[in-house]
Amino acid sequence: MLKSLGNTYLTDRFFILFGSLAGFFVLSFAIDILFPVAQTLFVLAIALIFIDWIILFNKNLQIHCERKTSKVFSLGDINQVKIEVQNQSIQNLRIRLIDELPFQFQKRDFEVVIQLKPEEEKVINYELRPLERGAYVFGKVNLFVETFIGLVERRMRKGEPVDIPVYPSILQMKQFELKAFDRISTTQGIKRIRRLGHSYEFEQIKNYVRGDDYRSINWKASSRRAQLMVNQFQDERAQQVYNIIDKSRSMKMPFNGLSLMDYAINTSLVISNIALQKHDRAGLLTFSDKIGATIKADRRPNQLNTLLAALYNEKERPMEANYELLYHAARKLIKGRSLIMLYTNFESTYAMERVLPILRRINNLHLLVVIFFENTEIEAFSQQEVNSTEGIYLQTIAQKYVSEKVQMVQKLQKYGIQAILTKPEELSVNTINKYLELKSRGLI
């Protein structure tokens, strides 16, 4: 009984009804004949409440409710959540559904109202976009049930709390996944890259088409067929591809809810998957003022899961990046010439020039690609129209900042270092294009 009372709540209709009755009693002080009528209505209202309560807490009133989600969520992506609700009673019910969402979403107003006929089932779909990695705890689903009387409502709590981990974007990884021997990608944003070189691993002989390397012409096969035939070669395999992520304070800057480090983590997972699909070996190294995760490049069956788990546990650090420490760690961990994707961020030319000698030393040993970010908000401001002296001054500074970023790319390229300057949301596409370009040119 006490438990039932604890799950009983009063509706707006209850307060409207008894507010009206209170007004009727007040009016009966002036008109005596209304007092017995008010008393009768009050008794009827109490009876209605009792009947409503009996219907709501009848053991035959059953509601099935189940929340369905994926086992893991993807960071920064839209993740679907589905709640199935079925009325298993003989009453028409009005249900106000409140799901206990993880605190990370800070959504305090989630509420859905549905009407269910007997044996009717409805599915509620909604979307969530997590912006932090980690464990997200869903509580129970709260159902506030009303009958056709609607004076009181019963709270029913369904399901059990469930933990759902938010991993680096698996959805993005699948979206950009390329098959190992694709010559042309149909994924949106991925450029069609013509091979400029080849390895020594022979694949097949095919008809010559315009654009093929004439040095690959097979003259014996051409004479037999009376038409030009060329040798086709497979991409080099088992090359080492390392993603190195700067997790210092310069990577904590947020864009569209995600930090630069989270963008880098998502892209590292994408590139690692593609490298493994291309039969290369993928590895990982993270650093700031000290070395974080270190995973040697390999292509074991569980390598992608190992990388995913390491990326899931990485945290930003409020310290400056120590590139000298990175150089020594890379010398120790990375054996043999490798492709290194370095995700970092330079906010000034001075910051880049300070670490340029170390970047050049790394590039002498490996093929280094430095990936850093445009500040999209400053770039948008630099292109706005301004009508004041202060606005012109600020816009000039913004344009100088944007220009410095381009000059950083040019300076890195001057010393033979590959560089990518990209918007955060275009990081994955631009990095994939660079990887495919370098592979097609036979540089790795």
Image (spheres, rainbow, N blue to C red):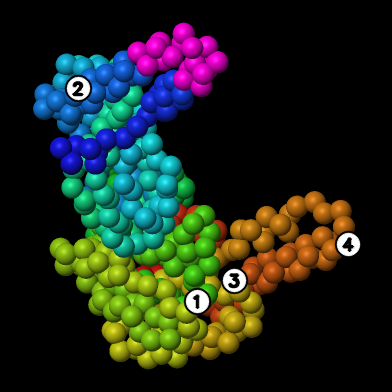
Q: Which callout, 3 or 2, points to the residue nearer the camera? A: 2
Q: Which residue is mark 2?
A: 55
Q: Are marks 3 and 4 in contact (CB under 8 Å)?
A: no
Q: Are marks 1 and 3 in contact (CB under 8 Å)?
A: no
Gap in Å between the C-alphas at discs 4 and 1? Answer: 33 Å
Q: Which callout, 3 or 4, points to the residue nearer the camera? A: 4
In the rendering, at what x and y percent does residue 434 appear?
45, 62
Residue 440 visible, this orientation: no
Q: Residue at x 17, y 16 (%)?
A: 90
Q: Earlier in the sequence, mark 3 or mark 2?
A: 2
Gap in Å between the C-alphas at discs 3 and 2? Answer: 72 Å
Residue 32: say if magenta.
yes
Q: Earlier in the sequence, mark 1 or mark 2?
A: 2
Q: Label for residue 249?
A: 1
What's under tag 1, amino acid-wise? Arg
Q: Earlier in the sequence, mark 4 or mark 1?
A: 1
- Disc 3, SS: helix
Q: Which residue is mark 3?
A: 409
Near-viewer residue (143 or 279): 143
In the rendering, at what x and y percent does residue 151 appear?
33, 24
In this view, 390 is above or below 364: above
Q: Are marks 4 and 1 in contact (CB under 8 Å)?
A: no
What's under tag 2, amino acid-wise? Ile
In the rendering, at what x and y percent does residue 131 appear?
41, 57
Image: magenta residue range: 23-41
Q: Which callout, 1 or 2, points to the residue nearer the camera? A: 2
